[in-house]
Amino acid sequence: MERLWTIMRKEVYHIWRDPRTLGLILLLPGLLLILLGFGISGESQDLSMVVADLSKTDASRRYLDYYVASDDFEVVASAASEVEVLAFIDGGKAQVGLLIPEAFGRTLETGGTAEVQLYVNGSADPANVQTIQLKLSAIGQMASQTILVRRITHVGAATGLSLPIDTFVKTLYNPNGDRKLYIIPGLIPVILELQGLLLSALAIVKEREQGTMEQLIVTTIKPWELMLGKIIPYLVVSTFTLLSMLALSQLLFGITIAGSFWELLGLSLIFIVGSLGMGVLISNLAQSQMQAMYLAMFIVLIPSIILSGMIYPRDGMPWASLFYSELLPVTHYLTILRAIFLRGVGAAALWPSILPLIGLSIVYFVASIFVFRKRI
Amino acid sequence: MSAENAIEIHDLVQRFGSFTAVDHVTFSVPRGEIFGLLGPNGAGKTTTIRILCGILLPTSGRASVLGFDVARQPEEIKKRIGYMSQKFSLYGDLTPQENLDFYASIYAVPRAGRAGRISELIELSGLGEHRKTLTRNLSGAWRQRLALACAIVHRPPMLFLDEATAGVDPVSRREFWDLIYRMAGEGTSVLATTHYMDEAEYCNQIGMMHAGELIALASPDALRAQMPGTLLQVDCAGPAQAFQVLEAMPGILEMAIHGARLHVSLAEPGQADELQRRLGRAGIAIRSLNAIQPSLEDIFLYMVQQRQPTPTHVVGE
């Protein structure tokens, strides 16, 4: 037992006396979360918008509210005609223009199709323009669907138009916020795994390369003491990272944990143990630090990003990819984290994901100890 | 298995793929003796030591250390040995004190006497003023003293030194060997590999290895006696040219260039005149010509040559 403590203390010295690496370990996850959190959720907030509301009715003001409420557009000016709207955009004072025709309110009341004209400054970055177009059409669609739904419920049209209203109501408000909510809890597992693997994948092979392992294996140290002594300090570092990322998601992205914090923490620790186990396993198998990095990158990290469901849904994947993703602890942890984070689901309802997570973590961790041989 | 021998090796073989690193080696080392394994790089010395330390499983043959079998009881051996590998293998980002603390704990040195033992080692190795310096900032000689201190922190009855003095200045090497001598005097058995032939003079017994085989096994004096003929040291103008001239002369057992001098081993002492005549005819001026004691290096070269049909041109260090 004392030996385990001694190994841990030595590992802490290694981490602590390399301040540059320590800084990277502590700062990078947060930076990555911020960068990717804003990047992937495609946030381009506060696009300037000029509005010409010629209808000036309750209906037109309500319609306008959809754009304002989306957080993406900021009405910087109002115009009195199409010519004025175009002048604002030409002059670079607004990126987007909205023209609500005089007949808007009347047409809606009589059940007809009202036309709304949107202008987008096409001279900006094409990708950006596309995003703006998508956003505008999404908001427009949402508004018209709401109106459609209201019509159906009011008039009670017994046609094939009837829609599952529940699902609509969800997407009605703030579609962008929803995406962010989806992305951030998806980033946390991948960043945690990235950090855990980079820390642990070098644990054994580095000592082998610098020759200190030869000196260690001629002693009476037991493999489990060495492995555990190396993993526990990393576990502490990863837990710190988890907590700081949770704090960042709340402070910066305004996402709070809907479910139990302690359940989330407990399951996260199991995931971290599994990730570190995989790293140490790789470190045991690799011949050099370079090889360990490649193995970690190509066997675990890239599949984790592509196959785990962080970005792409796993439903349509071919069976081989699906099977591979099942072997990655991150796949199951991602499901768990999203459920606890967003939907406030309790652990009791998550056993189909928790069991494989625990199973895989145990397998990888135990394997990392058993693969280690006190031989050259 | 005799308990009087610290090490017993019988018909040991280690193959890596098609390469045979240790080729049917047999020897034993009595307790309390210093045994030197000599030979060039790649002769199989390090591989032999690794097998004896229980960190390399031999392909075939038997080996035991302090009565424990290397294949079946490696952990029993590890409790009782100290090992200094040829590469510096302590933690550079730990201080000498921390490295010693670390190994004392790993070797489970009893807590009661631990601090005293570590102070004793720091004093013995003279590391006092460096105990709080990061090890990576120490010079080679200091690191090597620290490595020895770490290897003996648990007072092992058997010590393995693999090229322990490589890259260390002569004075430090001398001091290092004095320390080893003292430890052997107190009953520690030592197996050391080296390619500094002068260091072999410190050993009770010497095994010479070449290409995985043990080609000689005896005390330094006995080895010298094994070398037939007379060894001449020829100090002449062009040793390389002289070497070529003398290659044609019969009765020369072995020849090697040592710096500006030529060492020639003659079957008969009387051939010295013939040697002088031949060099004179070739126009090579002889500054001096003396009969000398063969060094271990001469013996090694002779032994190697005995195993090869054609004489080799070997340039000594």
Image (cartoon, coloured by chain):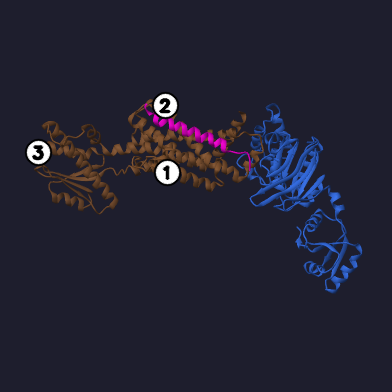
Chain colours: A brown, B blue
| Residue A295 shows in the view | yes
Q: Mark 1 vs mark 3: same chain?
A: yes
Find the distance from the CA under tag 3 to the CA under tag 2: 52 Å
Q: Mark 2 vs mark 1: same chain?
A: yes
Q: Secondary structure at mark 3?
A: loop
**A239 or B311, nearer to the observer:** B311
Between disc 2 and disc 1, whose residue precedes? 2
For label 3, the crowd category at 10 Å Cα-Cα, with few meaning under 14, some 14 to 19 and many 20 or more, is few
Quarter of the C terminus of chain A within the rendering:
top right
Which range of residues does the magenta coloring cover?
A: A349-376
Q: Is residue A373 magenta?
A: yes
Residue A91 percent across, percent down from the top left: 21, 53
Q: Residue at x 59, y 31 (%)?
A: A4
Residue A348 percent across, percent down from the top left: 38, 25
| Residue type beneath disc 1 | Pro
Between disc 1 and disc 3, whose residue precedes? 3
**What residue is disc 2 on?**
A262
Find the distance from the CA under tag 1 to the CA under tag 3: 51 Å
Left or right of A54, for residue A235: right
Left or right of A268, for residue A52: left
Find the distance from the CA under tag 2 to the CA under tag 1: 29 Å
Chain for numbered disc 1: A
> In the drawing, what numbered circle is on residue A303?
1
Q: Quadrant of residue B148?
A: top right
Marks 1,3: beta carbons within 8 A: no
Q: Main secondary structure of the magenta part?
A: helix
| Residue type beneath disc 2 | Trp
**What residue is disc 3 on?**
A111
**B37 or A260, nearer to the observer:** B37
Q: How many labels were placed on the picture?
A: 3
Q: Quadrant of residue B258?
A: bottom right
Q: Quadrant of residue B280?
A: bottom right
